[in-house]
Amino acid sequence: MPGRILVIDDEPQITRVLRAALSAQGYDIRTANDPEEALEVFREWSPDLVVTDLMMPGMSGVEVTRAIRVRFATPIIILSVRDHERSKVEALDAGADDYVTKPFSIQELLARIRAHLRRAPERTTSALEAGDFVVDANAHSITVLRRPIHLTPKEFDLLLHLSRHAGKVITHRALLTAVWGAQSAHQPEYLRVFIGQLRKKLEAETGKQYIQTEPWVGYRFIPEGIGSSEE
């Protein structure tokens, strides 16, 4: 599935390697070593996916992500030498779709890119009504009790998948695989971040709990709500 990919890294050697590897797979690649320059390229070129380093002078990958997320739902993959959970959570909270720790294999990165680019066609289905919710995958919009809810792209994908299996327990692994791809099936911190964010946003509008934890197993979406949310 060829597409446009913008690679942002302040190390020219990294951008050269990624340009060569991704171009060989048929992707149209542009690179930038300066984050502010990268945002200009993004606005002019409209890439299908962004790969950005985390630690860069002047503007971090998290700040780049926040700048893009003001208006765009483009998939963003963060690259970083930092492997601790706090950095991953911060990047995901900012709106990143994935977090890959350096050093990484090109094959792993390619798999993650393919997984994120595959997510877009899933949003072409018609609106789904369930309990208090109307989820329109085509318009990328969600209302609860007729009120619109602003969600990040990955929050939307997660709630869309939950709503398609309303009332059923979905395991951690199944959710991770469906929303982030098979390569993320063993990264539960993704779910903790996004489930927490969804609960806060939904409860702020309704005061109800819609996502129920099934300890050690996964989560159950109850579209009618069952009261105040759990911690």
Image (tube, helix red, strand yellow):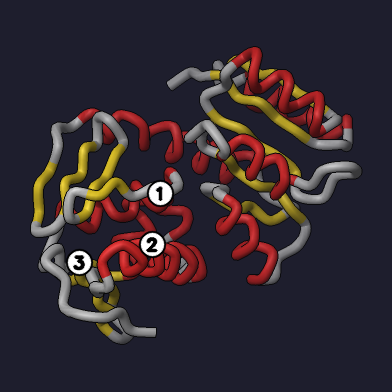
Residue in front for this viewpoint, 226 or 102: 226
Check disc 1 and give the amino acid type: Leu
Taking depth in this image into account, of 108 and 215 the one nearest to the observer is 215
Query: Which residue is found at the position 9% from the left and 54% from the top?
Result: 130
Label 2 packing within 10 angstroms: few (<14), some (14-19), many (20+)? some
Label 2 vs label 3, nearer the camera: 2
Q: Residue at x 24, y 36 (%)?
A: 137
Q: Which mark is residue 201?
A: 2
Amino acid beneath label 3? Phe
Q: Earlier in the sequence, mark 1 or mark 2?
A: 1
Could you say whether the residue bearing mark 1 is in a helix, strand or loop?
A: loop
Query: Closer to the camera, 208 or 138?
Result: 208
Report how far apart the C-alphas of labels 2 and 3 lie in the structure: 15 Å
- Disc 1 and disc 3 in contact, CB within 8 angstroms: no
State whether residue 196 appears in this view: yes
- Counting residues from the start of the chain, the first of labels 1 and 3 encountered is 1
Rendering coords of residue 81 (x, y %): 78, 57
The residue pinned by badge 3 equals 221
Give the quarter of the figure containing the C terminus: bottom left
Report the amino acid beneath label 2. Lys
Q: Which is more foreground, mark 1 or mark 3?
A: 1
Please name the residue shown 52% across and 47% down the image: 97
Please tell me whether residue 45 is drawn above or below residue 189 in the rendered image.
above
